[in-house]
Image (cartoon, rainbow, N blue to C red):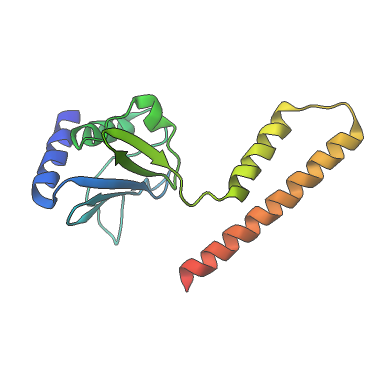
Amino acid sequence: MERAYRKMARDLMKKYGPLKRVEYLSHFPEFNIKFVFESKTVYSGKRRGRYDIHFMSLGYFGEGPRYAKSFLDEAGFSMTSKKIANIRPGAVINLKGRKVVVSYPDESFLIRLLQFMNNIDEKLDSPCLAIKLIRYLFLIIFRGLFILYILIMKKDENE
C-alpha cells in the first residue's frame, strides 16, 4: 500500500508542481492534512463532503502515519516514524534546504508558558501546602488566559 502513496505523491507533483508545505489541521477523528503544492492545495481528510486523499494521518504510530510517511518521503519531506508520531495539530511542515522543519506558528508565548507550567506541575510534588497553593493559583490563571486567547482567536477567524 505504501507504494501506492509514493506513486500518488509523484503523480500529484507531476500535475501540480513540487510540494511546498504541509499543514496538519486536525487529529482524530478527522485527520485533516493540507498539502500545498506549487499550483494547487490537496487535502487528506474529509473536506466539503469529499476526500482528495484517503487514510493519511500524523501524530501517532500506525497505518495512516505509515502512508503519510511514504507520501512525504516521495515528495522530498523525509522524516522518521518517530518524528511523524510526535507531530501535533497546528504543525506546519516546511523544507529548509533539504531539512524538514516542523513548526507551530499559532503557538504563542502564552501556550508555551502553559505547557511549561503543566510540566512543572507534573514534576514538582512539594509537601509544603503554601507552595502547592501558589502553583495551582498560577495554573488556574494561565489556563484562564489560555482560554481567553483561544476565544479571541476563534472570534478573529469568524470575522
Horizontally, residue 46 falls left or right of residue 144, namely left
| Residue at the front extreme, as displayed | 97
* Residue for point 21% across, 45% down: 19
Pick the front one: 105 or 123? 105
Residue under the point 47% across and 74% down: 159
Say above or below: 53 vs 76: below
Would you say 105 lies left or right of 12 here?
Answer: right
Name which residue lies at 35% across and 26% down: 81
Q: Position of residue 79 (x, y in %)?
A: 32, 29
Does 127 appear above or below 90?
above
Query: On the picture, is 77 further left or further right than 127?
Result: left
**Rendered image quadrant of residue 1:** top left
Q: Residue 35 in the image: x percent, y percent?
A: 27, 48
Pick whichever, 42 or 2, lies toward us: 42
Decide if residue 42 is in sight here: yes
User: Would residue 69 appear left or right of 133 to someone viewing this image?
Assistant: left
